[in-house]
Amino acid sequence: MPINRTEQALARLADLTPRKIVAELDRYIIGQADAKKAVAIALRNRWRRQRAPEGIREEIAPNNIILIGPTGVGKTEIARRLAKLTGAPFIKVEASKFTEVGYVGRDVEGMVRDLVESAIDLVRTERETEVEDLAHDKVDERLLDLLLPPPADVATPTPAPGGADASDRVFVASASGSVTAEQEAARDRYKRTRDKLRQLLRDGQLEAREVEVEVASRATQMPDMGNQPGAPDTMANLGEMLSELMPKKRKKRTVPVSEARRLLLDEEFDKLINLDDVTADAMERVEKLGIIFLDEIDKIAGAKSEMGGPDVSREGVQRDLLPIVEGSNVPTKYGMVKTDHVLFVAAGAFHVSKPSDLIPELQGRFPIRVELKSLTEADFVRIMTEPENALTKQYAALVGAEGTQLEFGTDAIAEIARTAAQVNQRMENIGARRLHTVMTTLLEELMFELPERGTEPVKVDAKMVRDRLKAIVEDEDLRKYIL
């Protein structure tokens, strides 16, 4: 009986309590406790629904969320880290890319198809990890066959099932019922040589040796009709499907062992992995665990008086989104997908519009709204020091690649945070992204001269920050251009 892998994925969620989820998000995202708590509860409810009585399980709708806040405060990062944490199928799409059906643009159902493709990649990667050792063993044997083809009168000593050695194999005997001594000697020499080559292969000493391999190639590559302007998403994979129906040819290529290993490994994975099982698991995982992050949802919202002209399709996009968020069957090339229990997390700055400008039906499908706070100077200091992927740590790693040590003083971090907060106040507030522009400008000369300057350690202090950024911060036109 096959193992229910979706149940295994749900079992992993059992250990992720809301408190643990928030603690994990805290490793990379500063502040925004309300948003973290909301998504943690929504994620835990995925597991709780599967443990509910079967009679009511289908009636429990996902807790779709709208994250409201200015750019650069962590909306997208929360969704991205959440997907990595759970191992659930996840995609991020921008609502502004969609248009009402009938207009040239992308159909909203395309995001469900993208989610299915993401799930198939996820499940296939898991399967490849499970059979990786076996696949590598098979590839090694095929490489040995290419490096040392067996003589015509010697059977290829491929390992027998169960680990049997050469003495357990059956050889073709002569008419008199005996195997000649010459054949036995040749067989022994071949086995010894093959064992030596196997060890050299495992030690990586034959990677540059060239071998001739046969690879599959399609006779004709059909054009991708989905790339045509205005083509619906149902056409996107038509060229691919037609290509798969064409007969495949085999052609020989002479490549190094390192390249041959990659080509043969793909073939072995295809043999060991049942694509139908992968597809079935992926479809089930999409329906039970899928997450769609719908960014820039405020771009399709607007008061009715504002609609018209080039924005005529905004309300139409909302109406096209409604059945998918509400729950419907979406056709994909792998079959129909039910979106009743896909979790939708929407986000938007809502500078011009507000959530109440969405059509009422769509508002009702996002019952949970969380407002993310703008980042302060103190938040910038924490962002630069606390997360595991803090900018200061990233730049220290980049400089360390050149053999130089980079250190940021406490006063330097405070000065960078003060500068970023000040520029955000005077210009457009882009949140933590302002730290990237400030840091890039601050360290531009160092990063350029690093290979020639030697390995002397670099200490960044507040004076260095002020000296490098003073002219730019004080010049309003220059500040807008650079920072």
Image (cartoon, grey):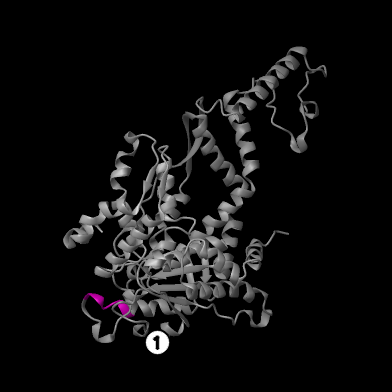
203 to 98, vertically: above or below: above
Q: In the rendered picture of this protein, how many numbered marks are placed on residues?
A: 1
Say what amino acid the circle numbered 1 marks: Pro
Q: Residue 161 in magenta?
A: no
Considering the whole magenta stretch, tell me its main secondary structure: helix
- Is 199 or 444 nearer to us in this picture? 444
Q: Residue furthest top?
A: 182
Q: Report the side of 332 relative to 465 (left or right).
A: right
Quadrant (top left, top right, bottom left, bottom right) of the C terminus = bottom left
Quadrant (top left, top right, bottom left, bottom right) of the N terminus = bottom right
Residue 15: x, y in percent? Answer: 65, 66
| Other residues around mark 1 within 10 Å, as few (<14) / some (14–19) / many (≥20) | few
Residue 63: x, y in percent? Answer: 52, 78
Residue at the image position 59 percent from the left and 81 percent from the top: 60
Q: Which residue is labeled 1 in the image? A: 360
Q: Report the side of 288 relative to 109 (left or right).
A: right
Residue 138: x, y in percent? Answer: 63, 37
Residue at the image position 52 percent from the left and 69 percent from the top: 337
454 to 246, vertically: above or below: above
Q: Report the side of 426 relative to 120 (left or right).
A: left
Question: Where are the magenta residues, as a range?
Answer: 310-315
Residue at the image position 44 percent from the left and 51 percent from the top: 393
- Is 345 or 150 nearer to us in this picture? 345
Can residue 113 be seen here? no
- Is 267 or 196 nearer to us in this picture? 196
175 to 142, vertically: above or below: above
